Image: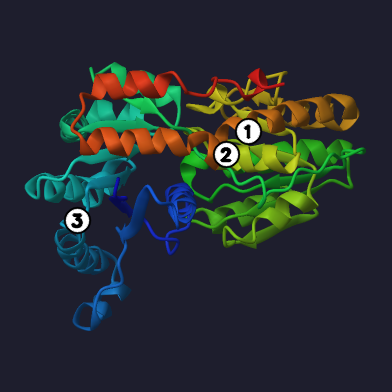
Amino acid sequence: MPALQVAFVAPSLRILGGQAVQADRLLRAWRGDPDVNAWLVPINPMPPGPLRYLTSMRYARTVATELTYVPSLVRELRHADVVHVFAASYTSFLLAPLPALIVAKSLGKPVVLNYRSGQAPEHLRRSAVARRALASAGLNIVPSRFLVDVFARYGIQAGVIPNIVDLERFAFRERPAVGPRLLSTRNFEPLYNVACTLRAFRLVQDRRPDAALTLVGSGSEERALRALATTLALRHVTFVGRVNPDEIGRHYALNDIYVQTPNLDNMPASILEAAASGLPVVATRAGGVPAIVTSGENGLLAPLDDHRAIAGHILRLLEEPDLARRLAAAAYAGCAARTWPAVRDLWLTAYRSAAARSPAGSVISRLARNDPPTSAAAHP
């Protein structure tokens, strides 16, 4: 059987975020595989010379990018057997996946729409365009059962294929002593509520003056977060900035507890990375996070924007190192179901079924038989 030709419509790593990282990992995983030949059609192409000067202007940049992106879709998708479209919410949905859907359909190409946003509940409630687009896709694939349930509210079927984690890039290390070295790797955008992490750290540092917090990321709230750290008189806070995915593993290796406090989320790869590195996870119950973290079994969860509960969990891990090690071990065991060998055949099933125009319901049923459990702790 000849290799399926699969075009990935996704952000390149010039936009450093969850979609770009997962797309890059999947593309690397398929490299050299006899069953799939995959390539990237970036949603953020660099405009050619005549348009490039517009990229320095905010709204003109969008126009220049779209004028480059849409022709690239027409040029690249005609060679594909299947089009794998990564999708987020709101304006991003209109600018990137929607044109890809339209072009793919005009060329008669089957689409696997891979929606990945924790903003789905509000996005689908507000956008009839998004609901119609998702309903018209040949096959919807999402990374967690959280999004399956959101889609079902609107009568849209979706199958689950989880995010993947590289157990070689993120090496597990058991920590005999759990130190007060905290790590956050969420970008500085409002939905990730890194301010809650800083407020929690203030309470931790009141009890543990030697505690340190490393913040890996960048974004629109960086100036405000730096100001908040100053206002709270925090010490030992390091703003690392944007880090290439190939380099982020060392930050997990250097720290002892992973903390994230988003208000909206889906299936954050950062939690899988922390688990693969042996860090116990403290997080808010945002979106699909409870689908991969069961509080008290493979991590500790707190209500949204509750910095006191977050701080309490961190201090508990510092005071109960046996608990920290037990949670970390359970989380690491659950990573096995989210490695490339575990999910490769799920993607191959999705691509082959899409290419054969199989009914979505039958494909989703086949995927469900191999879907990893909702809690990583189910793999002790």
Residue at 81% x, 25% y: name it. 326
* Callout 1 secondary element: helix
Q: Nearer the viewer, residue 161 or 257?
A: 161
Outermost residue toward the bottom in this view: 49
* Callout 3 secondary element: helix
| Cα distance in 3D space between marks 2 and 3 | 28 Å
Q: Earlier in the sequence, mark 3 or mark 1?
A: 3
Residue corresponding to mark 3: 77
Q: Quadrant of residue 59?
A: bottom left
Residue corresponding to mark 2: 339
Are dots 2 and 1 in contact, CB under 8 Å?
Answer: yes
Residue 132 versus residue 65 in the image, above or below: above
Q: What label sits on residue 336 in the rendered view?
A: 1
Amino acid type shown at disc 1 = Ala
Q: Position of residue 340 (x, y in %)?
A: 53, 42
Q: Nearer the viewer, residue 367 or 228?
A: 367
Q: Position of residue 202 (x, y in %)?
A: 76, 41
Estimate how packed mark 3 is, as few (under 14), some (14 to 19) or many (20 or more) residues with alpha carbons within 10 Å.
many
Residue 351 versus residue 32 in the image, above or below: above
Estimate how packed mark 1 is, as few (under 14), some (14 to 19) or many (20 or more) residues with alpha carbons within 10 Å.
many
Residue at 27% x, 29% y: name it. 124
Residue 17 visible, this angle: yes
Residue 157 visible, this angle: no
Q: Is residue 287 left or right of residue 177?
A: left
| Cα distance in 3D space between marks 3 and 1 | 33 Å
Q: Quadrant of the C terminus?
A: top right
| Cα distance in 3D space between marks 2 and 1 | 6 Å
